[in-house]
Image (cartoon, helix red, strand yellow):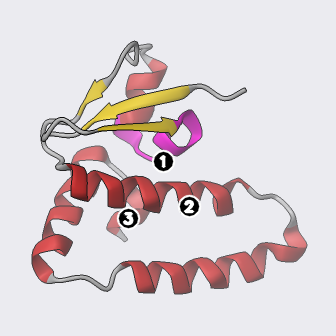
Amino acid sequence: MSKKIMLKSSDGEYFEVEEAVARQSQTLANLIEDDCTDGEIPLTNVTSEILAMVVEYCKKHVVVDGGDDSSSSSTSEEDLKKWDADFMQMDKSTMFDLILAANYLNVASLLD
C-alpha cells in the first residue's frame, strides 16, 4: 500500500496524491525525504486550479515513467508526447501560472 500525501493549495483546497506522484516534484520529494509530510503540505504559491493541472501531469508521467516493459515503452512514449502536447493547449495566463508552479515545485519534466 503506497503512502498518500496531502497537498493544500493557496486557496485552501486539498489534494490527496500517491507518494510516487508527489515525488515527480523535487521540492515535494525533498520534503518526503526529510519526513516533513505529516498532515499536509501547504503550497502557498499554487492555486487549486493550477495544482490540479500539476497533479494531473504528474499522475500521467508517473504511470509512464514507472513502467519497465520495454515492448510497450515506445508506444507509451509516443502516447505521452501526444498527451503532453494536448495538455499544453491553454491560454498564456494559465501557461504562465503553470510554469511558475512547475518552477516552485521543481517539476523538471513540466518545465521542458
Quadrant (top left, top right, bottom left, bottom right) of the N terminus: top right
Tell whether label 2 touches label 1 (CB within 8 Å): yes
Which residue: 40% across, 12% down? 38
Comparing 38 with 25, the one in front is 38
Q: Residue at x 13, y 41 (%)?
A: 11
Callout 2 crowding tier (Cα within 10 Å): few <14, some 14–19, many ≥20: some
Q: Is residue 106 above or below residue 93?
A: above
Residue 16 magenta-drawn? no
**Sequence-first disc among 3 and 1:** 1
Mark 2 lies on residue: 61
Q: Total label count? A: 3
Per the model, the C-alpha gap separating discs 2 and 3 is 10 Å
Residue 110's mark?
Answer: 3
Residue numbers of the magenta segment: 18-27
Identify the secondary structure beneath mark 3: helix
The disc labelled 1 sits on which kind of residue?
Answer: Gln
Amino acid type at circle 3 is: Leu
The picture places residue 101, in percent across and down from the top left corner, at: 22, 54
- Tell me which numbered mark, 1 or 2, is placed earlier along the sequence: 1
Dot 2 amino acid type: His
